[in-house]
């Protein structure tokens, strides 16, 4: 049976005036796992029985980063599905996009993660390592820059 997980790619816009280019003002939130290879990923997790995908993404973001839905805004028009293999099993991860309402909101990690970073696109892609996640981050960035 395929594994299924859902999460949010969360970004913040730095204060206007720090750069004239839109893409220089965007940073993405990545969390470093406290298990396995300590990889970096947006908040995400497995779907619980009776939960829909978006409920999972919101719950996991609250559990892993301490962010509740009043602290960010879901961005209409972006949803990305990643498919890859983990331990010889197919896995699907669905991400929605969310913008922080206040770029200084505190991140509160669960014990599943040992660190977090706000990163510009290229730094985020280097940390993310996996090509599927890098592609998702680039797709988000292109989407945001096309709306500017």
Image (tube, rainbow, N blue to C red):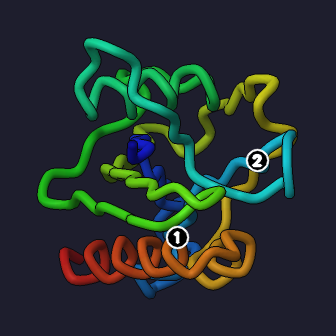
Q: Mark 1 points at which residue?
A: 133
Q: Mark 2 points at which residue?
A: 116
Query: 105 or 32: nearer the eye?
Result: 32
| Left or right, residue 101 beside residue 111 | left
Residue 98 in picture, x, y percent from top left: 36, 47
Element at label 1: helix
Residue 142 in picture, x, y percent from top left: 32, 83
Image quarter of residue 4? top left
Q: Which residue lies furthest to the left in this view?
A: 77
Q: Can residue 7 be seen in this view?
A: no
At 77% from the left and 58% from the top, the residue drawn is: 39
Query: 145 or 9: nearer the eye?
Result: 9
Q: Is residue 101 visible?
A: yes
Question: Of the residues tagged 1 and 2, which is closer to the observer?
Answer: 1
Query: 26 or 134: nearer the eye?
Result: 134
Image quarter of residue 92? bottom left
Q: How many marks?
A: 2
At 27% from the left and 33% from the top, the residue drawn is: 53
At 53% from the left and 60% from the top, the residue drawn is: 15
Which part of the image, by quadrant, shows the C terminus? Answer: bottom left
The Cα atoms of the two marked residues, 1 and 2, are separated by: 16 Å
Q: Earlier in the sequence, mark 1 or mark 2?
A: 2
Residue 60 in picture, x, y percent from top left: 50, 28
Which part of the image, by quadrant, shows the N terminus? Answer: top left
Kindly indicate whether the residue at mark 2 contacts the one at mark 1 (C-beta within 8 angstroms).
no
Query: 8 or 14: nearer the eye?
Result: 8
| Left or right, residue 30 beside residue 28 | right
Residue 6 in picture, x, y percent from top left: 39, 41
Within 10 Å of disc 2 (Cα), the crowding (few <14, some 14-19, many 20+) is some
Tell me: residue 13, above or below residue 96.
Answer: below
Element at label 2: strand
At 58% from the left and 74% from the top, the residue drawn is: 18
């Amino acid at each position: 049976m395929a594994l299924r997980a859902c999460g949010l790619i969360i970004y913040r816009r730095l204060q206007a005036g720090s750069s004239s280019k839109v893409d220089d003002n965007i940073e993405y939130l990545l969390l470093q796992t406290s298990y396995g290879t300590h990889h970096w990923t947006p908040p995400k997790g497995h779907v619980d029985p009776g939960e829909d995908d978006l409920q999972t993404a919101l719950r996991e973001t609250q559990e892993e980063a301490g962010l509740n839905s009043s602290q960010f805004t879901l961005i209409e028009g972006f949803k990305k599905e990643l498919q890859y293999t983990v331990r010889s099993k197919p896995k699907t991860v669905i991400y929605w996009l969310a913008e922080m309402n206040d770029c200084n909101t505190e991140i509160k990690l669960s014990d599943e993660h040992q660190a977090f970073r706000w990163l510009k696109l290229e730094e985020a892609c280097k940390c993310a390592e996996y090509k599927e996640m890098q592609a998702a981050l680039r797709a988000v960035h292109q989407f945001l820059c096309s709306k500017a």
